[in-house]
Image (tube, grey):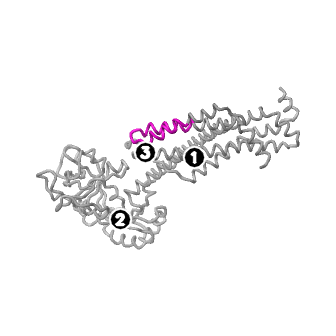
Amino acid sequence: MPYELFVAWRYVYRERRSAIMWIAVAIALIPLVVGAVLFGATSAKATGAVTLAIGGVLFITTLLLALFTTFAAIAVLGLAIGSAILIWVLSVTSGFQTEFRNKVLGVNAHILVLKYGISFANYREVMDKAKKMDGVVAVAPFLFNEMMIARGNRLSGVLVKGVDPKLVGRVLSLPKHIIKPRRICPETRDCAPGAGAAEMPKLLTATPKKHKAGVPTRLPGLVLGAELAKKLGARVGDPVRLISPLSGLDVAGWSADVDLPRSRDFRIAAIFDSGFDEYDKRLVYVHMSEAQAFFDHGDVVTGVEMKVRDVYRARAMSKALYAALGGSPYRIVDWSELNHNLFTALNWQKIFLSVVVGGFLAVVVCFNVVAALAMMVIRKGREIAILKSMGSSSLGVARVFVACGSVVWAAGASIGVLGGYLGALLLRRYGFPLDAKVYLIRELPVRMDPVEFVLVVGVSLVVVLAAALYPAIRAAQLEPVSGLQRGRK
């Protein structure tokens, strides 16, 4: 072991400790154990999480004070807390990015093929070309229209998507999001077991007789989101009406050239819950043929949607497909472009929070390390003078205090990473509830990325070593004579 590291360890390690310190460490274990027990109980998870956090901080604080000198313990604790907080911020922001991406890709396709201003009647040719591309998993046509949905006197604006029930389950994750019915009720039986994507045709055509008497039983099926169903007060089997908007309106009153809104009755065949509030309260699925017949547009679609094996190659595949289709009038949009504003905002949010929180914590850590090492220089002035008298160079003395900073970093970063990991794990296990109307999702998402952990450790090393330079230079400049005189005082 180099003598600088040996001396540095002596400077930061507490050589004398009383029994009271160990008693304090043992007492600090009590809230930690109580918090773990409470967190294990379903009815007291929130109380348990708070108690665990408080107990963890108390235990680490008392343990550090028992192992290190007071100023070194404060510096280590400050670095540990700062590293843990930065890991939590990065984990939560990464969680938001991942959660939004998963929700978007669960309801939307990876690539959309659209057509400018011309009816998309040749969609089958486009589908055939898309299927031949390497990396394409499945393709399906779709039809979009903005409409109103009504149940009794309750109305809501919706986005109606016409889909092919035999293909939609291969492109989208819609079948996985179906929450009601758990078992599909067709016309001929009371209940039959559902089977994921294979049941989508039944969902969009199921017309159970067992619901309200007098309601026609041959209504086409419709699948809507859980939030929309709650808003309408509707359940599976209830009849609803889709109403197309007015195509024209004379401000002086109704006139002969005004197209009246068209409407058609459907029956709720299923309810889905994507976990993304914006989709759950706006999106409605119907059979493609029903949507085409409703608008009397013939066999045309809005576009073709595709699922690819690697979502991060979607943009490159979009360009290749665009070239294969001959360019204009086609327009091809991948999932990242379709949700560009959302993902850009999330990226900037992560950068902003990381810089602000990281910068603030870096200042606090620097102050703690500088203060701790400066106090060591003052208190160890006589020992520094003796080291120089024994032949140690100024550079050697400076390395001693840089080594002190390294010890502080090693202890603080280790505790911080462990605390950050356990805290993020606690947040993920607890499932901290969010207001879906504000955040669009219902639980605080947490995603731990090892690369971000390494980044936090690396940044903390740079910050601590930079903070250790000033006290190290001051110690190196200390003259042996003045150091010995300071020690006698």
Which element type, helix, strand or loop, lies under badge 3? loop
When asked about the image quadrant of residue 266, the answer is bottom left
Left or right of 17 on screen, residue 147:
left
**Lower position in the chain sequence, tag 3 or tag 2:** 2
| Quadrant of the image containing the C terminus | top right
Q: Give me the C-alpha separation between circle 1 and circle 3.
A: 20 Å
Q: Which mark is residue 431?
A: 3
Left or right of 203 on screen, residue 395:
right
Q: Which residue is mark 1?
A: 418
The amino acid marked with disc number 1 is Leu
Give the x, y percent position of residue 400. Answer: 77, 43
**Lower position in the chain sequence, tag 1 or tag 2:** 2
Q: Which residues are magenta?
A: 29-58
Left or right of 210 on screen, residue 93:
right
Q: Which residue is mark 2?
A: 170
The one nearer the camera, 7 or 443, is 7
Q: Residue furthest top?
A: 489
Q: Is residue 37 magenta?
A: yes
Q: Is residue 26 magenta?
A: no
Q: Give me the C-alpha separation between circle 1 and circle 2.
A: 41 Å
| Residue at x 29% of width, y 65% of height | 198
| Residue at x 42% of width, y 56% of height | 338
Which element type, helix, strand or loop, lies under badge 2? helix
Which element type, helix, strand or loop, lies under badge 1? helix
**Lower position in the chain sequence, tag 1 or tag 3:** 1
Query: Which one is in front in this view, the residue at disc 1 or the one at disc 2?
Result: 1
When asked about the image quadrant of residue 487, the answer is top right
